[in-house]
Image: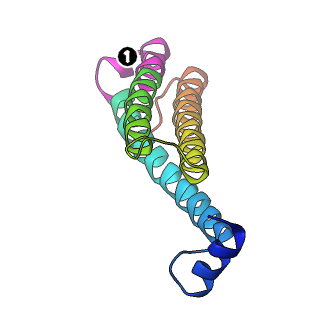
Amino acid sequence: ATREEEARKVEEGHIESRDRVVVNLKTAGVLMAHLTGFTAINSFGSMQQLEWFSQSPWHTLAVVPVASLFCAVLGGVTERVRNHLAMADGNRDSLEEMWDEQVAEAEDDVMGLVTSFLLVQVLRYAVSGSLPNA
C-alpha cells in the first residue's frame, strides 16, 4: 500500500499508525520480558534451594547452565513458531520483522535477568557461606 492509502486507513480507523504499532510492540516486549524474567528467576532460584544444589556454591553454580540451556532451547522453539506464523502468508513484512526483533531482544533480556540473578546468588553464597533465599 502507498503512504497515502495507509494514511487514509489510519484516519478512517481501519489500522493503527505505524508509530503506534511500534510503541505498542516495544511496550509489550519489555513488559513480557520482565514478567518472564522474574518468573524464571523464581523458578531457577527455587531450584538453587533444593537439597543437592544448596550443598555448596559449586553445586549452586550448576543451576546457571541449566537455566541458560532451558532459555536457549525455549528461544529456539519460539523462533521456529514465529517463523512459521510470519511465513503463513508466504512473505515476511516489515511489521513481522519488527515483531521478531523485539521478541529476540526480550529473550536476551530474560537470559540476562535470570543468569545475573543466579550468579549473584552463587557469589553471595560463596562470600557469606549461606545461600540467600530466592
* Quadrant of res 80: top left
Q: Is residue 6 magenta?
A: no
Stretch in magenta: 50-67
Residue 2, compared with residue 100, is above or below; it is below
**Residue at 59% across / 47% down in the picture?**
102
**Residue at 54% across / 49% down in the picture?**
99
Q: Residue 70's spot in the image, x, y percent? A: 39, 26
The N terminus - image quarter: bottom right
Q: Which of the two residues, 50 or 126, is positioned nearer the viewer here?
A: 50
**Residue at 71% across / 69% down in the picture?**
3
Which secondary structure dominates the residues rendered in magenta?
helix
**Residue at 38% across / 31% down in the picture?**
74
Residue 119 shown left or right of residue 39 in the figure: right
Q: Which of the two residues, 95 or 128, is positioned nearer the viewer here?
A: 95
Q: Residue 64's spot in the image, x, y percent? A: 48, 22
Residue 3 shown left or right of residue 91 in the figure: right
The C terminus - image quarter: top left
Q: Is residue 57 magenta?
A: yes
Q: Residue 20's spot in the image, x, y percent? A: 63, 71
Residue 79, compared with residue 25, is above or below; it is above
Dot 1 corresponds to which residue? 55
Q: Which of the two residues, 13 or 23, is positioned nearer the viewer here?
A: 13
> Looking at this rendering, what residue extends furthest in the bottom direction?
12
> Looking at this rendering, what residue extends furthest in the top direction?
58
Q: Residue 79's spot in the image, x, y percent? A: 44, 34
Q: Is residue 109 visible?
A: yes
Q: Which colour scheme is used?
A: rainbow
Disc 1 marks which amino acid?
Answer: Gln
Q: Which of the two residues, 92 or 46, is positioned nearer the viewer here?
A: 92
